[in-house]
């Protein structure tokens, strides 16, 4: 039940966020023509339509697999694996920060 609420709230957050990125990047081309050349083809503002078309179906196909894996693992193993993931992501950010 909690996962369903989380998914529902995620949609409520992501749609206004995407609209905000479209709006924020919409007028940048007129202000900075050189920067506009860096935009990806098929983009609305800062939102890539190609990325949306690829990411959305893959997410919908892989979500049930992720749910099955999460329910098959013991709670402690899931907590530890998520903690390791967070440590690895943090280490990557720290490494990139000091390598600039």
Image (cartoon, rainbow, N blue to C red):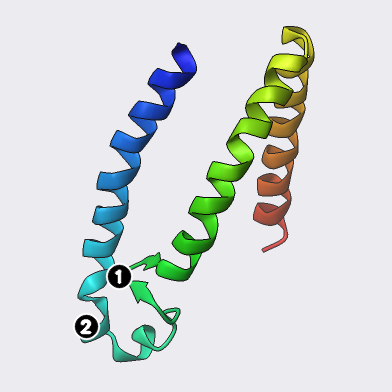
> In the image, what residue occupies the spot 77% across and 15% down?
73
Taking 59 as reference, is 11 above or below it?
above
Give the vertical position of 42 relative to 98 (above or below).
Answer: below
Residue at point 43%, 20% (across, down): 4
Position above or below: 63 against 35: above
In whole angstroms, how far apart are the C-alphas of marks 1 and 2?
Answer: 13 Å
**For the N terminus, which image quadrant?**
top left
- 76 or 4: nearer the viewer: 4
Seen at 66% across and 31% down, the residue is 66
Residue wearing tag 2: 31
- Tag 2, which secondary structure? helix
Q: Please state the horizontal and vertical placement of residue 33, each as a whole percent of the image.
A: 30, 90
Secondary structure of the residue carrying numbered label 1? loop
Would you identify the image quadrant in which residue 81 lies? top right
Return the residue nearer the eye: 64 or 9. Answer: 64
Nearer to us of marks 1 and 2 is 1
The foreground one among 79 and 7 is 7
81 sits left or right of 58 in the view: right
Q: Which comes before the other along the chain, label 1 or label 2?
A: 2
Give the number of the disc on residue 11: none
**Residue that carries the numbered disc 1 in the rendered image:** 45
Number of marks drawn? 2
Horizontal and vertical percent position of residue 17: 30, 47
Please tell me which residue is depicted at 55% across the width and 45% down the height of the picture.
59
Q: Neighbour class for label 2 at 10 Å: few (<14), some, many (≥20)?
A: few
């Amino acid at each position: 039940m909690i996962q369903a609420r989380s998914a529902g709230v995620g949609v409520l957050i992501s749609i206004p966020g995407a609209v905000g990125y479209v709006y924020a990047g919409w007028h940048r081309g007129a202000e900075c023509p050189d920067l506009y050349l860096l935009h990806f083809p098929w983009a609305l503002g800062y939102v890539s339509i190609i990325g949306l078309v690829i990411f959305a179906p893959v997410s919908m196909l892989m979500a049930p697999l992720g749910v099955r894996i999460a329910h098959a693992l013991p709670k402690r193993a899931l907590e530890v694996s998520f903690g390791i993931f967070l440590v690895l992501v943090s280490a990557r950010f720290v490494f990139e920060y000091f390598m600039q």
